[in-house]
Structures are given as structure tokens and as C-alpha cells.
Amino acid sequence: MPGNWWHATRFEHAIHCPGTARAHERIRYLNHPKFRGQYQMNVHDLVGKTLRDLGVDTVFGVMGEVNMYVMYRFVAEGGKYVKAASEAGATQMALGYSSTSGRVGVATTTCGPGFTNTMTSLIEGVRAHHPMVLLTGQGRDDLRGYMQSVDQRAFAIAAGAGFESPDNMHDVQASLVRAFQRAYSEKRPIVHELPPYNLFAAADIPYRQYTLKLQQTSIALEPGEAWDQAIGIIATARRPIILMGHGAVMEDATQELLALAQRIDAPIMTTLRAKDHVHGAPGYLGLMGISCRTEAIDAILASDCIISFGASLNTYTTGEGAYLNDKRIVCFNNMSLDVGKYVVPDVTLTVGLKSAINYIIHWLDEAEVEGSGFAQEEVVIRAQDAIRLPRTLQNPEFNEPGFLTYDKAMQVIDESLGARILVTEGGRYKYSAWHNIFVDDARDFIPSLSYGCIGIGLGHGVGAALAKPDSTVIIVVGDGGMMNAGMAELQTIQNEQLNVIVVVCNDGAYGAEYHKFIECGRDPDLTLMKQPNFSDIATALRASSIKVEKVGDLPLLRQKMKDWQGKGLLLIELVVDTRSSE
């Protein structure tokens, strides 16, 4: 027998007998340079060790028979395994980790129901363009009628995710590397499915040490007719608005965009995914779209040209297209994923944004084109002055001095925090969080709204907290979302002692549906929900909590946040009148 068989066999015994110290001893022995690249191991050990070789430090998951020994080896190699309460939550954590860190997030589930529980979260990741790898495996092939068998490839493809699996046992490492490379370049989740195998059978697979070098593809600038048309539109626009999207944030094109805004004297707005990234800049008018401040709408309607950088111009950004009427549209995009999906601009250029902006400024200077002056017009100045003030509800009935609104509470939360990450999900309360809680960098904002879900915010927030432990993560959810799926990960926050504040916006109803019934003259009783006392639930988890029901409670909220030590959960329950739930 080959000499390495003894080592592999001894290690097999040790790795499946975690009650002994032999597993860790054998790992150290086989990692010695004398044996590295020579010895053989089974699939579990191969994948667990390769994950560490690829630079993965954290994996979020729920244990099952196809992944338990992989994670055992991963942890033995020095990795951190975060125990999620649900597979959906584990996937959301990987998405939140990816969004905040800029790295490929990693989650793991068992086969069958463990995998299919991730579907909603996978779709969110696909539509939000978050790179992540979901590691799972096929059901056993040595047992006829194995109950957890399902066509996982079909589910992954239906969700819009990529799918990778090794061609054979000797392709396991290479296929894992492909999954990471694809996740990064395609900006979406990739499901990596290990082949079926008997869990305790040794598979002699030679080990090879891999490294992962992920690089962003550079899109070259190629002058031509489209460029002439784009610069011509920009040069002749009298009332242009610059729109900054998520692509510009990811390319760090902020300074270049501000320079262009100054050069053409144009106001600047952002999409939701670029929230606050140029907050306070000259001419800044906040968010564009259905979530924009009402005070900025007049300026948008007065403009004659939208110059978009790294934005998809989706239905929500464009106010269902209304904000683009009678305007020329020039779109610069550094990712071809969404180009032309929602809007057909006058000119579309797929190009690196920094080089594109510098090229535009160069030719405007060459042609001695004067600035538009739009940023100095009264309609823009009025809007800019208005959005510097705290947002209030439009209905004066709910703005009386003693009446508690989400806006008033969110403003207290914002002023009481230092470095923060903001996570929200679907619900009417989200507008209050977006307009009252600010972040210094748009990468520290996760709307988790690309699939219109509720009940997924907590998972994203856990991942973000582990990606940036020095920041406070604020997760703003509705009472319906918390009951839908959110409470599953409260214990994870406590177990990991994360720096997380969960704000439960409790209006006792599914608020959006409540108001739709009211608007069409129907009884909203079907939307009303009798909820538990969320602050009591937090207390049962040995977490800090406070219930805020009136304006007089806001000083107590401010003091509670000041006294909180930042380790483990702080749950803030905001109870407001259902009628004022925006």
C-alpha cells in the first residue's frame, strides 16, 4: 500500500471521533511542509481545508450530514463557523457579510430541505448582485429512496443563482475555486454541490494547495460615435442632474463624480443602494425615486437631462418612469448586468466610471463648455435647504408635539450612535429609517429589498456585524417581518455577542396593506395583527430592551442607548398608531 494511506486512514479515524484530540494532532502533522501537497484525504477534509486556503475566515450555516464534517475540518483549520438558527438566515448572513465587506460570503446547508429553505434568500442575493457561495451536497447515493434527495440544480437555476459541481472526485478543489471566481465576477450567489458519497467512506484524493486571486475586470474606454453623442448631450444640457448608483460606489468614483458635478454646475442625487454616499455635498438632493424626499421632486421634474453612473435606472429609481419624461438620458455603467433592462437611454456606455468621468471633463474643458448653472437655480436651492431639515409626515395630525412617530424616534437613534451600519427590509416604516438614519459610506447600508421580502433583515445584519465588528449594526424591521422570520436569529446575535440594535417598528398591522385598504375604502381589519411584547422576548433572551410608546419615552431611549455596552442585542420596540405607519 502507498505510504500515505496510513496517514489518511489514521486521520479518518480521528476526524470522525471528535471526542479525542487526535484529529487536531493529525491536521498539524499533515500540514507540515514535508507532507503538504503529497498526502491524500477524503472530500470533507479536502473542502474544509481548501476553504481556508482560499482565504475564507467565516462560514454561516446549519449543520446536516452533507456538511458537518466539512465544517469540522474548516474550524480545525482555524476558520469561524457561525451557527444560524435557519438555513434562510445563514444565507442572509453570507449576503450581509458580502455586502459590507466586499468579499465573497459563504454559507452552508445540508441537502434537500436544508437547501430549499434558502430559496427566498438566494433570489434576494441574485437581484442585489451579492457575490456569495452556498456550499451544499447531494443526498446519499447508497440508499434507495433517500428522503432528502431533490434536484438542487433546478432550484438554483430557478432562483437565478449559478451552479457548480465537480466532474469527479479529483475535480472537487478546482470546482470550488471556480465557484468563488464565478461569484465574484458574476456578482451573484453560486451554489456549489458536492457529489453524493457515503459519509464515512474514505476517498483518496490528492491534496493541492490553491490560492484565490479575484480581480475586478477593467472595462476599457473606447472613444467613438456613442462617446461623441454622450458628450454632446452633456454639453448642451441646461438643467442636468447627476445620478450616482451602486456601481459608482463599488468603483470608488465619488471624487470624480463630485468634480463633474462642480464642472457642469449640476445637482447630484443617488439611488437607494448609494444612499448618503455624497451626503452634504454641494447640490446634493438626496435619493431619487419613489423614496425621494417630496421637496426634491420639483427639481427632478424641472431637469432636462439625467446623467447616470453605475445605476440600473429601475422602476423604483425612476418613479415608474415618470421622472424621466421629456429628458435625455445618458447612462454610464461599469457592469453590464442591468444595462437596458428597465430603460433605453439616448446613449449607453459600458465603461470604467473613473476613466469615463475624467474623459468627459477633459473634452468639456477642451471645448470650453460653460457650466449649466442648474445647481444655482431657486428650485434646486429650495430643495437642498428643505432636505437638510428633519423629515416629518405630511399629515399634520400626526406631527403634533406629543405624538410619537417613527421619524421622531429614528432621529434620536441616529444622533445617539457613532460608526454604524444600517439594515432595513420591506415595510412602510423603511422610509423613515432611510431619511433619518445616516451612514458614512453606502456600503454600510443594506436595504435587503431587491426581492421585496420581509423577515430577512436580521440575517443580513448578523453577517454585517461579523464583517465589521467595530461598527454598530442597526436593523430596522416591522412587527410583521419580525414574526414572519426575524426572531429566528435573535439568539444568534446573543450567542455571538454582536454589536447589534434591532428596532422593531410595531404598528400592530401589515402597514402597507392596511393603508391600501383604507385608500380604496375597504375595512382594513384583515391586516391587523395582535403581536407579542417584543421587549419581553428580548428580556427572555437575556438581552437589553426598551419599549417606546410616546414622545415622553424618547429621553429614556436616548439614555438606554448611552448605557448600552454594545455587546449582544439591544431591542428597541417602537409602538405607533397604525394610521401613521409611514
Image (cartoon, rainbow, N blue to C red):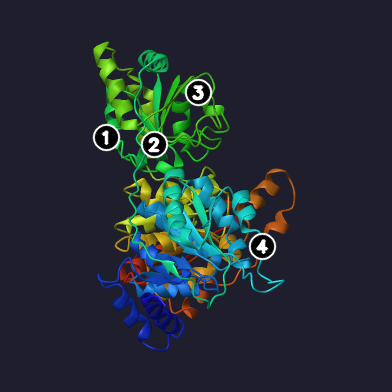
- SS class, disc 4: loop
Mark nearer the N terminus (3 vs 4): 4
Structural distance between the alpha carbons of marks 1 and 3: 25 Å
Residue indicated by mark 2: 386
In front: mark 3 or mark 2?
3
- Closer to us: 120 or 199: 199
Quadrant where the N terminus is found in the figure:
bottom left
Residue type pointed to by label 3: Pro
Mark nearer the N terminus (4 vs 1): 4
Residue indicated by mark 1: 255
| Number of the label disc, if any, that sits on residue 150 | 4
- At which x and y percent is residue 300? 46, 27
Relative side of 426 to 238, left or right:
right
- At which x and y percent is residue 85? 52, 71
The answer to whether marks 3 and 2 mark residues whose Cβ atoms lie closer than 8 Å is no
Q: Is residue 437 visible?
A: no
Residue indicated by mark 3: 345
Residue drawn at point x = 34 percent, y = 31 percent:
353
| Number of the label disc, if any, that sits on residue 456 | none
Mark nearer the N terminus (4 vs 2): 4
Residue type pointed to by label 1: Gln
Check the image and report above or below for 193 versus 161.
below
